[in-house]
Image (cartoon, helix red, strand yellow):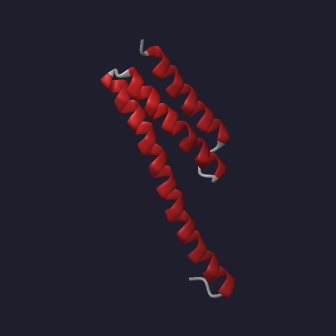
Amino acid sequence: MAQHQSALKRIRRDSKKTLLNHARIARIRTFIKKVELALASGNKTAANEALKQAQPEIMRGVTKGVLHQNTAARKMSRLNARVAKIA
């Protein structure tokens, strides 16, 4: 167990940050699942709307440091391609 004041503070800060990051990741996954559900139902308008809501959320994950920029770009590109394929 940590003994120094700074180490104890770091443990407290890390645990708070971890909870916040997990919440952000869960929120991003929820938005992605909404797009996938719309794709599964075959509804193009719903898929477009869900994608428009998911894109800023994914990019917010990049700015907050939860996702790597290339990962976010890959996810958005693949979702865009799947939505465009529905016609």
Picture layout, residue 19 above or below residue 57: below
For residue 22, side relative to residue 65 (left or right)? left
**In this picture, is 6 found above or below 55?**
below
Query: Which residue extends farthest top?
Result: 87
Dividing the image into 4 quarters, which one contains the N terminus? bottom right
Nearest the viewer among 3 and 63 is 63
Which quarter of the picture shows residue 45? top left
- Tell whether 5 sits left or right of 18: right
Q: Residue at x 45, y 38 (%)?
A: 32
Residue 13 in the image: x percent, y percent? 60, 73
Q: Which residue is painted at 65% across and 80% down in the image?
A: 7
In this view, 45 is above or below 12: above
Judging depth in this view, the residue of 74 and 31 nearest the camera is 31
Figure quadrant of residue 11: bottom right
Position of 44 with respect to 15 (left or right) is left
The image position of residue 38, as x and y in percent, is 36, 29
- Picture residue at 57% right of the left edge, 27% below the top: 77
Count of numbered tags:
0
Quarter of the figure with the C terminus: top left
The residue depicted at 49 percent of the width and 45 percent of the height is 28
Q: Residue 83: horizontal and vertical position, in percent?
A: 46, 22
Residue 54 appears at what percent x and percent y?
A: 50, 38
Q: Can you say whether 53 is above or below 62 in the image?
A: above
Taking depth in this image into account, of 69 and 56 the one nearest to the observer is 56
